[in-house]
Amino acid sequence: MASSIVFYDIPSSLPDKAWSPNTWKTRCATSIWPDVQSADSKTLTMVPDGRYALNFKGLSYRTVWLEYPEIEPKLREMGAAPTRNKPDGRPHYTLPLIHDLSTGVVIAESSRIAAYLDATYPDTPRLMPEGTIGFHFAFEDAALALLPPIWKYAIPASCAKLNPVSEAYFRPTREATFGVAMKDMMPTGEADVVEWQKVKNSFGKMDGWIRDNSEGSVYLMGDAPCYADLWMAAYVIWIKLVLPEKFEDLKSWHDGRWAKLAENMAKYETIV
């Protein structure tokens, strides 16, 4: 039986191609990946992802890989809505995105993809338990605000994993946003100690949310994972893929919470 859902993702030079935290959120649910919003403020918005979501729900899908320069032309061709505007007011198109061939729906942004999948396929495991859509959107905003410390590590590491055509797009846009050459972005020496501690503090805040909600639980809402857990796992897998040495350190943080989360989410990491 042909897959009714087409999932659009960005490839890399890694063996399994997948790398972006944004698209991992959707793939495992059925990925976030920072994209430029304002070069002046150096603010990044995240493209919520989808691989975890699709796999979590056990839905049949197939992947279409788009290099960065291919994204806007393809999404315009499909009639997809832009996810935001660029600083100059032009529409901005981002992944993840799914095209549900059974309904004709084309939808981007991982949290909205998750809400759509729950509504359209109610007989599959819910990503956002009944009555928690607003909570999950608020969680995403709050968690995103914690993540800027990781950019200076994961952005140059990710750039090095991209295929040449995407790297040629990615490098100048990120260098313009941060005002620093890609080769100088990664902290080293004493700066690395200070900046990596900031990353640990950010994950510590999320660890605290889970502890406050349910002592001893691996998941934010209790015994079963929800979209928020897949969202956090997408960033853990991102670090694992592009910063393997840093991932070894991260695994020891917060009583091994993130190592356990990665272990539990591994079954949702199938790439098709």
Image (cartoon, grey):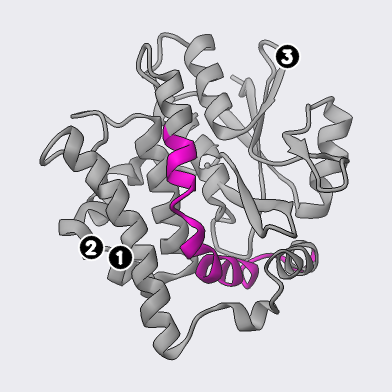
Tags 3 and 1 in contact by the CB under 8 Å rule? no
Q: Is residue 269 visible?
A: no
Q: Position of residue 166 (x, y in %)?
A: 75, 61
The quarter of the displayed image where residue 269 is located? top left
Which residue position is annotated with label 3? 104
Along the polypeptide, which appears first: circle 3 or circle 2? 3
The quarter of the displayed image where residue 237 is located? bottom left
Does the magenta segment cover residue 153? yes
What is the secondary structure assignment of the residue under circle 2?
A: helix
Q: CA distance from mark 3 to mark 1?
A: 41 Å
Residue at image point 60% right, 72% down: 156
Residue at image point 41% right, 62% down: 240
Q: Within 10 angstroms of label 3, few (less than 14), some, or many (20 or more) residues?
A: few
Which residue position is annotated with label 2? 253
Magenta span: predominant SS is helix
Vertical relation: 147 (above or below) 47: below
Residue range (magenta): 139-165
Say what amino acid the circle numbered 1 marks.
Leu
Q: Position of residue 235 (x, y in %)?
A: 44, 52
Which residue position is annotated with label 1? 250
Vertical relation: 263 (above or below) 62: below
Tags 1 and 2 in contact by the CB under 8 Å rule? yes
Along the polypeptide, which appears first: circle 3 or circle 1? 3
Q: Position of residue 141 (x, y in %)?
A: 49, 38
Relative horizontal placement of residue 145, taking residue 226 as reference (left or right): right
Vertical relation: 13 (above or below) 235: below
Q: From the viewer's side, name the closer residue of 128 and 73.
A: 128
Residue at image point 43% right, 44% down: 143
Pick the quarter of the image with the N terminus.
Answer: top right
